[in-house]
Amino acid sequence: QRTAPVTIDTIEEQKAITAKSPINDVQTRIEIANRMQRPKLLSDMCCFKAANRNADFEDFVSWYGNPKIDQFVGSSSSSSPDTMTAYAALDAASEAVEFLTATRDFWADTWLLATPKPAEEQHPLFDGSEEIEKILHYFETMHPAHLINQVLAVNFTNANFILRSTAGPAMKIPCIQRSFSTLEELVWKALRLLNDEMISDLARTPENGEENNLLSPELLAVCEDVCDCVSAIETLLAHATSLMNAFPGSLDIVELILMNMNQDVIVDNIESRTSIFRAILKQQNKKSGDEQFKLMKNMGKGDGDLYDCPNPAAREYVFRTLVGKLPSRLFAQVGESEESYGHTVIGKGVLLAFTKSFID
């Protein structure tokens, strides 16, 4: 027998509907089970009759297989096979026989209703409009904890993907690679916990007093680790991008600085030391209109682009005092040339702004 394409939550929902309970007797469960399998069974019987004109019901059963009722038969959720008494085992066996007999009778009645029709001439079993309605109904009636579960799974996966996509050349740095490996492990751990807790919550029976198990302390701790790792990688990528612009092609010095952000860095490599001095010289020579800058550019000996920096349109300074009863803040913008950036025009001159200041 071919199994119908269903999702995990649908399977758990079907098991909950056909589960044994005081308000769900055997006959009711049999009717529900037959109603669930009727569309697929009728379609298969029509196809079989179209391909085998002289076949009877027994031929179909020998080809299709006996009814599978294991998903609809079972003891209550409070009992397990190890603790089941002889009376309970006998009751389960008699219930299975009743299910099997009723299912065979249902199959025989469906066989009489089936007409020979190939699959290509039948109406598709998958109804897109109906499935969309089910999805919308699920969104409208879903538990808030289920929504948080789904949102966390999507956000964690997207965060990992976006960070990897925007890392660019920084992915060649060993410490960046190790950080992404750690993030991927944490994301997969969080996804497994989210999936397990969702499945266990869908299988719970509220009428028995079982409470919602979503967002356990273990899951919250893993989610917090994922968020901390994402924040650390964002900061690391920002530093790495800045350092790679200052030291192009020197991944070893970038790695050394990233691994010792709050410590003194000792560089033994002559090439790395040269890269640091060149970066410092480039930063110092950014002053606009400096004749020394033009001289160093002409003396670059093929490295003129090293000193080819854009002239700043303005320089901004902030002076703040927190002493006294009236702390204040002075903002000064010094425009060095007349520049236009879209709708913003920076003029040549000085702009001052004096405001009150507060301790952050």
Image (cartoon, rainbow, N blue to C red):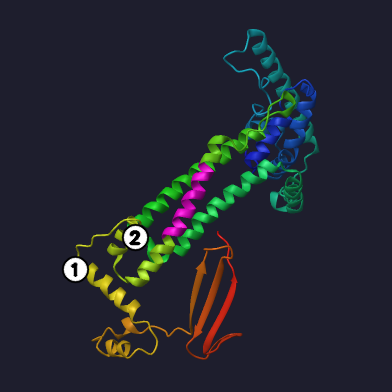
Amino acid type of the residue that numbered disc 1 sits on in the rendered structure: Ile
Residue 183 visible to the viewer: yes
Vertical side of 341 occupied by 354: above or below: above
Location of residue 353 in the rendering, given as x and y in whole percent from the top left corner: 58, 77
Q: Which mark is residue 89?
A: none
- The residue lying at 21 percent from left, 69 percent from top is 271
Location of residue 21 in the rendering, given as x and y in whole percent from the top left corner: 74, 22
| 352 displayed left or right of 259 | right
Q: Toward which corner of the image does residue 59 lie, by quadrant? A: top right
Location of residue 52 in the rendering, given as x and y in whole percent from the top left corner: 68, 41
Question: Can residue 283 be found in the magenta stretch?
Answer: no
Q: Does label 2 or label 1 sit earlier along the sequence? A: 2
- The residue lying at 40 percent from left, 52 percent from top is 179
Q: Nearer the viewer, residue 35 or 117?
A: 35
Q: CA distance from mark 2 to mark 1?
A: 20 Å
Q: Which residues are magenta?
A: 222-236
Q: Which mark is residue 270?
A: 1
Determine the secondary structure under disc 1.
helix
Q: Nearer the viewer, residue 30 or 320?
A: 320
Determine the secondary structure under disc 2.
loop
Front: mark 2 or 1 = 1
Q: Which residue is mark 2?
A: 173
How many residues crowd around disc 1 within 10 Å: few (fewer than 14), some, or many (20 or more)? few
Q: Nearer the viewer, residue 351 or 49?
A: 351
Vertical side of 231 occupied by 109: above or below: above
Q: Are marks 2 and 1 in contact (CB under 8 Å)?
A: no
- The residue lying at 43 percent from left, 85 percent from top is 311
| 272 displayed left or right of 337 | left
Q: Quadrant of the N terminus?
A: top right
